[in-house]
Amino acid sequence: MLKVFEPELPLTHCIRPFLVSIAVNNVVPLRGGDVLRVVGFRHELRSPPMRILGTLVVERLLIYWFS
């Protein structure tokens, strides 16, 4: 979803934050990995925090909808 806003963003810059946030969510309570993705990876994703949060919310809704 973030590649729509930033077409020159490499795929590897999108996969690493996604996988790290899933790993941290499995270890840290209260969705700590999601907070890490929004705050910690904003420079790597080349997006403002609210855009990352918006894609995160859409991702969670899609997971909820299709599960």
Image (tube, helix red, strand yellow):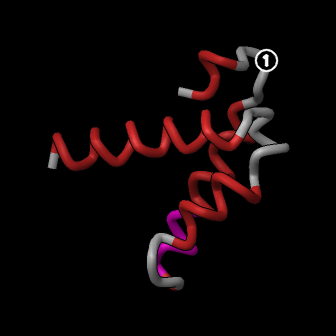
Other-residue count near label 1 (Cα within 10 Å), few / some / many at <14 / 14–19 / ≥20: few
Residue 50 image offset from top left, x and y in percent: 62, 39
Classify residue 46 as left or right of residue 67: right
Residue 33 image offset from top left, x and y in percent: 57, 67
Secondary structure, magenta segment, majority class: helix
Q: Quadrant of residue 15?
A: top right
Q: Name which residue lies at 17% across and 41% down.
A: 65
Q: Name which residue lies at 28% across and 39% down.
A: 62
Classify residue 36 as left or right of residue 64: right
Magenta segment boundaries in residue numbering: 21-26
| Residue marked by disc 1 | 8
Task: Decide which of 64, 20 is in the foreground and name it.
Answer: 64
Query: Does dot 1 land on a helix, a strand or a loop?
Result: loop
Residue 52 image offset from top left, x and y in percent: 60, 40
Above/below status of 28 relative to 19:
below
Residue ranking furthest to the front = 50
Residue 6 image offset from top left, x and y in percent: 72, 19
Q: Is residue 2 magenta?
A: no
Classify residue 37 as left or right of residue 47: left
Q: Name which residue lies at 76% across and 45% down.
A: 42
* Amino acid at dot 1: Glu
